[in-house]
Image (cartoon, rainbow, N blue to C red):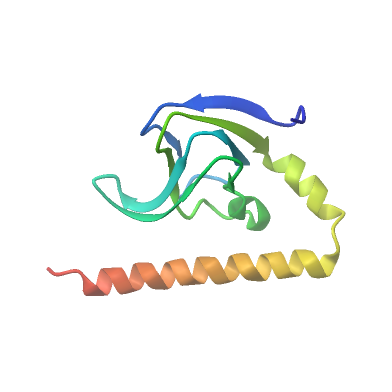
Amino acid sequence: MSAAFERRTFAPGEMIFKEGDPGDSLYVVEKGRVRIWRGEIEHPTIIGSVDEKGVFGEMAIFDRKPRMANASAELESVLMRMPASVLRESLYGADPLLRQLVQLLIDNIRTMAKRLDELEANTQLP
């Protein structure tokens, strides 16, 4: 892989990033599996898992907003980390329409996540 990537191993259950952290990089799963989740560690709302060759953490790079979820290693995982600056440099050369479309998709995902949080808060019993 490119020199822009940094390889790191995470133990099962180890946090990779937390909701609200700055989006300073994206990750590629070289080996293992990563869980993406929201809420408290004792009662997580699982968004999904990222398997080998999968990518995660890209949304915060595109829109420069804080992470909208937590990421932790489900299994022992080897991840390749790409700094935000490398991806942003690639994006600057992309077609403006494509950049706008990507931003629209990310905005839609963030809006849906916010609405789900509101629904969940309204349906919890006192």
Q: Is residue 95 left or right of residue 78?
A: right
Q: How many marks?
A: 0
Please state the horizontal and vertical placement of residue 52, each as a whole percent of the image. 56, 40
Is residue 35 shown to the viewer in this render? yes
Q: Nearer the viewer, residue 85 or 10?
A: 10
- Residue lying furthest left in this view? 126
Left or right of 125 in this view: 89: right
Q: Is residue 105 above or below residue 93?
A: below
Q: Quadrant of residue 35?
A: top left
**Could you say which is closer to the camera, residue 23 or residue 94?**
94
- Residue 37 at x, y = what percent? 39, 51
63 is higher (above) or lower (below) than 73: below
Q: Is residue 18 visible?
A: no
Q: Residue at x 81, y 46 (%)?
A: 89
* Residue occupying the point 47% across, 71% down: 112
Q: Is residue 121 above or below residue 69?
A: below
**Residue 30 drawn at (x, y percent):** 59, 33
The residue at 41%/33% (across/down) is 75
Residue in the image at 60% along x and 55% along y: 59
In screen coordinates, is 58 left or right of 121?
A: right
In the rendered image, which quarter contains the N terminus? top right
Residue 107 rendering spot, x and y as whole percentages: 59, 68
| Displayed quadrant of residue 84 | top right
**Residue 53 lies in quadrant:** top right
User: Which quarter shows the C terminus?
Assistant: bottom left
